[in-house]
């Protein structure tokens, strides 16, 4: 009997311990596990999404988890474009929008939240969520899509917007706000949905406060003809340009701004474009000065051989900025030179000359330091006067009008280059901007990511398919 009681007590004790351990294990959070990647989900909206005959100017959107709304001014787009900015707030699981304009009759409204809605814990984005409602008895279904590229470079600028004006006066873009607005994505594409059928003028502009073409230094694009919105409006390509460049502020070179031991350094200094003691076979030799020059005496500079015999054929000139002397000469490989600079060769705007004369010793590079280049073009339309643009470090290093399907050059500097094609309408060799007042579109540059890698002492060949 005692053994039975003891066994029963032992079983009770073991059961109690197991229950205790199980209950403790139940409150320990699991380690690891997959990360939550699911974006917030809309579970309720008042008025409901895509509602008709709406009169309320307050909208409440409720999600299945706590949310936040980032960069409201950059992400959220209201259509039609409001005169007064709506008030947008978020708290816990709700986003509240209060419209401050009077609602227009028989009008479809949309609110595109872009990439602004995120869950608070993981930051998962509810991408391009758009809320719709109509004050009439139907939702408008007009659409318009297309693409916008920078005409001068062929690149994409996803900070730009496309706008539609209901006011068809040509001056509306300068003075009034647009009717509809949409953003351009990272591939240059845009789309308008649920807009009213009718006629519009369409433009591209930066996404600034005014949304007007009130500055000719702004990026800008326009359609050649009136845009007629239907249920299936044809796509359009915008070529965006900058009519006037922003003028960069440069420091004056009229006086020295360098100091030595706390005192102003009034000496006129110079440097050269030589790579060590090597001169490039394909470019001029440059002597660059620390300040703007007032005078240049070409009789005080001499290009010589190693015996200091002056060489004929050398041309000396001052650049347009008056800070550099250009020495042009038909360089040949592996030749040695002496460049003699006399003290009085230049004077800066203060009348300061060099502290002393100097002689530069240098040698030209070998042809084996360069590579040959051969480009074969396929699908090139020569009636559009194509110009080959060689791009290095985002700058045009060379522009070559193309006359045939193959371009060849014996000597080319080694390096990585991008290749673009300018369609040179006026055949002046450079890109030309558009002009809205003259209804003149910009010239177009084609860039499909073509790249060329030039290796020294190597035959470099690349096919360019348009």
Image: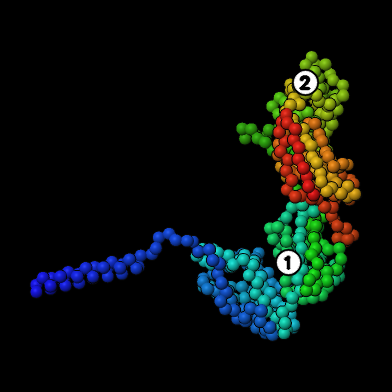
Q: Pick whichever, 337 or 341, lies toward us.
A: 337
Residue 448 numbered tag: none
Residue at (65% x, 64% y) in the render? 74
Q: Position of residue 15 (x, y in %)?
A: 23, 70
Query: Which one is earlier in the sequence, the residue at label 2 or at label 1?
Result: 1
**In which quadrant of the rendered view does residue 45 lie?**
bottom right
Residue at (55% x, 64% y) in the render? 124
- For label 2, count other residues whose C-alpha is less than 10 Å away and answer few (under 14), some (14-19) or many (20+): some
- Residue hosting label 2: 335
Q: Height in image: 60 above or below 227?
A: below
As helix, strand or loop, the secondary structure at mark 1 comes to strand
Q: Height in image: 186 above or below 173?
A: above
Q: Height in image: 157 above or below 312?
A: below
Q: Is residue 4 left or right of residue 228?
A: left
Q: Pick whichever, 87 or 30, lies toward us.
A: 30
Residue at (38% x, 64% y) in the render? 29
How many numbered marks, from 0 up?
Answer: 2
Q: Position of residue 143 (x, y in %)?
A: 76, 71
Report the coloring of the rendering: rainbow
Q: Pick whichever, 315 or 460, lies toward us.
A: 460
Q: Position of residue 234 (x, y in %)?
A: 81, 67
Query: Which quarter of the figure is the N terminus placed in?
Result: bottom left
- For label 1, count other residues whose C-alpha is less than 10 Å away and answer few (under 14), some (14-19) or many (20+): some
- Residue hosting label 1: 191
């Amino acid at each position: 009997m005692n053994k039975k009681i003891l066994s029963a007590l032992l079983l009770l004790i073991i059961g109690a311990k197991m229950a205790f351990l199980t209950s403790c294990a139940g409150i320990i959070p699991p380690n690891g596990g997959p990360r939550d990647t699911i974006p917030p989900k809309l579970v309720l909206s008042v008025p409901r999404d895509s509602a008709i005959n709406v009169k309320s100017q307050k909208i409440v959107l409720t999600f299945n988890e706590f949310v936040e709304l980032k960069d409201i001014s950059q992400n959220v787009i209201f259509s039609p474009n409001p005169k007064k900015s709506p008030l947008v707030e978020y708290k816990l699981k709700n986003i509240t929008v209060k419209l401050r304009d009077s609602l227009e009759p028989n009008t479809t409204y949309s609110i595109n939240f872009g990439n602004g809605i995120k869950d608070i814990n993981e930051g998962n984005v509810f991408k391009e969520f758009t809320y719709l409602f109509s004050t009439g008895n139907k939702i408008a279904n007009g659409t318009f899509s297309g693409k916008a590229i920078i005409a001068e470079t062929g690149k994409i600028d996803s900070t730009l917007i496309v706008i539609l004006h209901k006011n068809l006066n040509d001056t509306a873009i300068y003075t009034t706000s647009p009717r509809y607005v949409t953003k351009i994505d990272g591939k240059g594409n845009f789309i308008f949905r649920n807009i009213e059928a009718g006629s519009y003028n369409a433009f591209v502009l930066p996404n600034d406060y005014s949304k007007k073409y009130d500055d000719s230094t702004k990026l800008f694009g326009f359609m050649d003809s009136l845009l007629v919105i239907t249920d299936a409006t044809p796509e359009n390509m915008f070529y965006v340009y900058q009519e006037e460049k922003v003028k960069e502020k440069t420091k004056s070179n009229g006086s020295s701004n360098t100091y030595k031991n706390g005192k102003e350094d009034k000496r006129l200094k110079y440097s050269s474009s030589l790579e060590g003691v090597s001169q490039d076979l394909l470019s001029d030799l440059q002597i660059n000065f620390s300040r703007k020059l007032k005078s240049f005496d070409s009789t005080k500079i001499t290009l010589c051989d190693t015996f200091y015999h002056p060489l004929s054929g050398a041309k000396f000139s001052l650049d347009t900025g008056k800070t550099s002397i250009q020495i042009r000469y038909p360089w040949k490989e592996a030749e040695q030179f002496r460049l003699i600079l006399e003290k009085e060769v230049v004077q800066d705007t203060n009348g300061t000359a060099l502290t002393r004369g100097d002689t530069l010793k240098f040698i030209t590079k070998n042809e084996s330091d360069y590579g040959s280049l051969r480009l074969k073009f396929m699908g090139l339309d020569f009636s559009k006067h194509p110009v080959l643009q060689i791009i290095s470090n985002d700058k045009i290093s060379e522009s070559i009008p193309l006359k045939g399907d193959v371009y060849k050059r014996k000597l080319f500097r080694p390096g990585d280059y991008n290749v673009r094609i300018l369609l040179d309408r006026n055949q002046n060799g450079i890109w030309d901007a558009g002009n809205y007042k003259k209804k003149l579109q910009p010239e177009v540059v084609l860039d499909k990511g073509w790249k060329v890698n030039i290796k020294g002492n190597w035959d470099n060949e690349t096919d360019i398919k348009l």
